[in-house]
Image: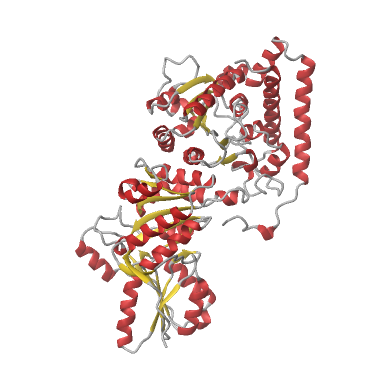
């Protein structure tokens, strides 16, 4: 006997994001959205929720982020679109010094429920000032949560959870995933923050990744399977808080771990995961692997990008 | 509309309490114990504006915030306890002197990042405009001439004007940006303004099509009248206003500070313009108060601060087990 399958809708990642935003704006009148071109690019939101809740802004990332923080302190739940991850550097004061710290510095008097949406990652050929994985910077900053999904279902479910969370959240979308289709459970679909997913079970090796490179790791696991090696693949989904329990459970089973991501390796998420496993699961590790990460240079030229993949391991 | 006599005496009393509190904190500051950024000399700017606001309004301020907090009614004991990092401080000892917020008084932020208050203020005013808080409420943001040199000043003003936010920009132009004189940081003041040492920042704001006024920031009556006008205008049309209050930072940037970098002639020029001395003399001249009552007000401020210091010193330290509380909601 088979259990009836959960009804699903197939959609691409961008549609999953749009559904999450619309559903949460419908559910909670305190949710507002603004940023460069938000109203221009999302006319359906303006039509349903009005121009007051869906706003274009001046091209000024610092005040977009600051305005979100101030509005959040007053009880609104802003979603801001800051377009590309490198642009976040222009909004660092509001995000790092204000959103991340002011709850603590106020002794819990204020909270800052807001979501920053941004695109990241190589694959669009627009060079290093548009494509740069900066997620580890925000993992390092206190008081922030960092989400970076890989599938359409998780984009929807995690974004809905992020909008409902009472903390400031950086929500990264890998550019290369924007048009990736996937099955999204129909109806209410919320994925809790801070939980990794075992996307492929295995007993010989744990491969830890997140965002776009999860797909590469699943391909690698298939290749390994042809050679008789069954790899377990973990999609972190949320980088902060990090789901350390799932990591430990897997590594204690397999005894081997590789961490893969596109961002620069030095002081990156892979380094942190490797350090965590070395500290808490050292007895289970049969080999020690360097994290496999991207390169510090971000060339526009496709030929260079290919060679970079081949030659940069840290 | 004239300010009632009792209200003017109350403003003088608030200025005296701010001065007594900050001088007590400065006297305690040593290179090894927590210092403080005082607003000595700027009390009229704080009191004149804050007393033009209503409880429904919201305030964001900067690292020289004791004046704004006390003018708003903050308890000096809890204020000093926070400076000392004690559990009875407004932020349970997590802030110290530089980030004090008081939700119950509508003070959302003391920003020690110069310009941080300007970064958040439009969002607070936007939320008010969108129905968070009480109807008709406005936001006042206090910043200095240093913050006006930050890019965020221009971003905040442009957004407030473009979105017509109920936001009062209050620039306390105190002639100093940490250890740098304001005149080194911007072009000469416009000749058109009658107030010595002011006008350039208002001219910048006016360039953003923001209605502005340049006021003698050491004259509490003038500040209060200008602030009441500005607040009434904001409530009437919902749009922002800008006040440049020209004042002077009489003490150093961060206590202890010997002000060796300050021209004594400049200090000597501003000392006679002290806002408390001027307000007191005017009330004496107008026979609103007598010298006996003035002495009584001074003594009461001193006694309040003495009791506040004792309260703060007796307040416990936060428990170490609560170190990581309040990082996340």
The quadrant holding residue B324 is bottom right
Q: Quick check: A134 above or below B275?
A: below
- Name the foreground residue: A222 vs A291: A222
| B271 sits left or right of A31 in the view | right
Whether residue B41 is visible to the viewer of this picture, yes or no, is yes
- What residue lies at 66% left-to-right and 21% top-to-bottom? B276
Of residues A157 and B161, the one drawn nearer to the viewer in this rendering: A157
Q: Residue B222, image x and y in percent?
A: 57, 18
- Position of the C terminus of chain A, as image quadrant, is bottom left
Give the left or right position of residue B126, taking residue B278 as reference. Answer: left
Residue in the picture at 52% in, 78% down: A281
| Residue closer to the observer: B195 or B61 | B61
x 57%, y 36%: residue = B59
How is this picture coloured? secondary structure
The x, y position of residue A116, in whole percent, is 42, 53
- Counting the numbered discs, the total is 0
| Relative height, residue A231 to residue A298 (above, below) | below
Asked whether residue B33 appears in the rendered view, the answer is no
Identify the image quadrant of residue A216.
bottom left
- Which quadrant of the rendered structure holds the N terminus of chain A? bottom left
Q: Position of residue B246 (x, y in %)?
A: 53, 22
In this view of the protein, which residue sits in the foreground, B50 or B132? Answer: B132
The quarter holding residue B68 reads: top right
**In the depicted structure, whether residue B76 falls above or below residue A239:** above
**Percent x, y for residue A136?**
43, 60
């Amino acid at each position: 006997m088979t259990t009836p399958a959960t009804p699903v809708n197939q959609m691409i990642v961008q549609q999953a994001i749009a559904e999450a935003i619309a559903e949460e704006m419908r559910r909670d009148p305190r949710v507002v959205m603004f940023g460069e071109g938000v109203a221009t690019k999302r006319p359906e939101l303006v039509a349903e929720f009005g121009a007051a809740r869906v706003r274009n802004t001046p091209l000024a990332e610092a005040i977009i982020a600051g305005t979100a923080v101030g509005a959040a302190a007053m009880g609104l739940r802003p979603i801001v679109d800051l377009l590309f991850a490198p642009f976040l550097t222009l909004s660092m004061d509001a995000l790092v010094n204000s959103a991340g710290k002011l709850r603590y510095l106020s002794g819990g008097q204020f909270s800052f429920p807001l979501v920053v949406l941004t695109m990241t990652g190589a694959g669009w050929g627009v060079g290093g000032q548009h494509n740069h994985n900066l997620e580890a910077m925000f993992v390092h900053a206190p008081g922030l949560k960092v989400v970076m999904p890989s599938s359409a279902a998780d984009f929807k479910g995690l974004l809905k959870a992020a909008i409902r969370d009472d903390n400031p959240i950086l929500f990264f979308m890998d550019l290369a995933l924007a048009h990736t289709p996937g099955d999204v459970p129909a109806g209410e679909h919320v994925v809790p923050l801070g939980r990794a997913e075992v996307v492929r079970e295995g007993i010989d090796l744990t491969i830890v990744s997140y965002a776009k490179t999860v797909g590469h790791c699943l391909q690698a696991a298939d290749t390994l399977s042809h050679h008789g090696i069954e790899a377990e693949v973990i999609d972190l989904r949320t980088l902060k808080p990090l789901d350390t329990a799932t990591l430990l459970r897997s590594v204690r089973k397999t005894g081997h771990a590789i961490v893969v991501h596109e961002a620069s390796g030095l002081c990156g998420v892979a380094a942190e995961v490797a350090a965590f496993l070395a500290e808490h699961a050292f007895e289970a590790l049969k080999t020690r692997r360097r994290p496999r990460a991207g390169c510090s240079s971000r060339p526009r030229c496709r030929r260079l990008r290919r060679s970079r993949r081949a030659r940069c391991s840290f | 509309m004239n300010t009632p006599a009792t209200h003017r005496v109350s403003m003088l009393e608030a200025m005296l309490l701010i001065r007594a509190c900050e001088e007590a904190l400065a006297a305690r500051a040593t290179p090894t114990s927590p210092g403080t950024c005082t607003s000595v000399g700027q009390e009229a700017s704080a009191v004149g504006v804050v007393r033009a606001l209503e409880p429904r309004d919201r305030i964001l301020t900067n690292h020289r915030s004791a004046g704004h907090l006390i003018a708003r009614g903050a308890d000096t004991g809890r204020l000093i306890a926070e400076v000392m990092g004690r559990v009875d401080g407004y932020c349970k000892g997590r802030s110290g002197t530089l980030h004090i917020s008081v939700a119950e008084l509508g003070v959302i932020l003391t920003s020690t990042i110069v310009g941080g208050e300007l970064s958040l203020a439009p969002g607070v005013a936007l939320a008010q405009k969108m129905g968070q808080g009480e109807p008709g409420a406005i936001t006042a943001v206090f910043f200095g001439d240093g913050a006006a040199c930050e890019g965020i000043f221009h971003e905040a003003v442009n957004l407030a004007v473009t979105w017509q936010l109920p936001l009062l920009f209050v620039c306390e132009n105190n002639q100093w940006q940490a250890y740098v004189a304001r005149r080194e940081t911007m072009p000469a003041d416009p000749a058109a303004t009658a107030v010595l040492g002011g006008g350039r920042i208002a001219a910048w704001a006016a360039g953003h099509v923001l209605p502005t006024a340049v006021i003698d920031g050491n004259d509490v009556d003038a500040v209060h009248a200008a602030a009441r006008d500005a607040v009434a205008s904001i409530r009437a049309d919902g749009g922002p206003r800008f006040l440049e209050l020209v004042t002077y930072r009489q003490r150093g940037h961060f206590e202890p500070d010997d002000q060796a970098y300050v021209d004594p002639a400049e200090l000597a020029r501003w000392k006679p313009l002290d806002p408390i001395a001027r307000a007191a003399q005017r009330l004496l001249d107008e026979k609103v108060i007598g010298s006996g009552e003035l002495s009584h007000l001074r003594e009461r401020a001193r006694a309040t601060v003495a009791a506040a210091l004792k309260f703060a010193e007796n307040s416990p330290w936060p428990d170490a087990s609560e170190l990581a509380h309040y990082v996340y909601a």
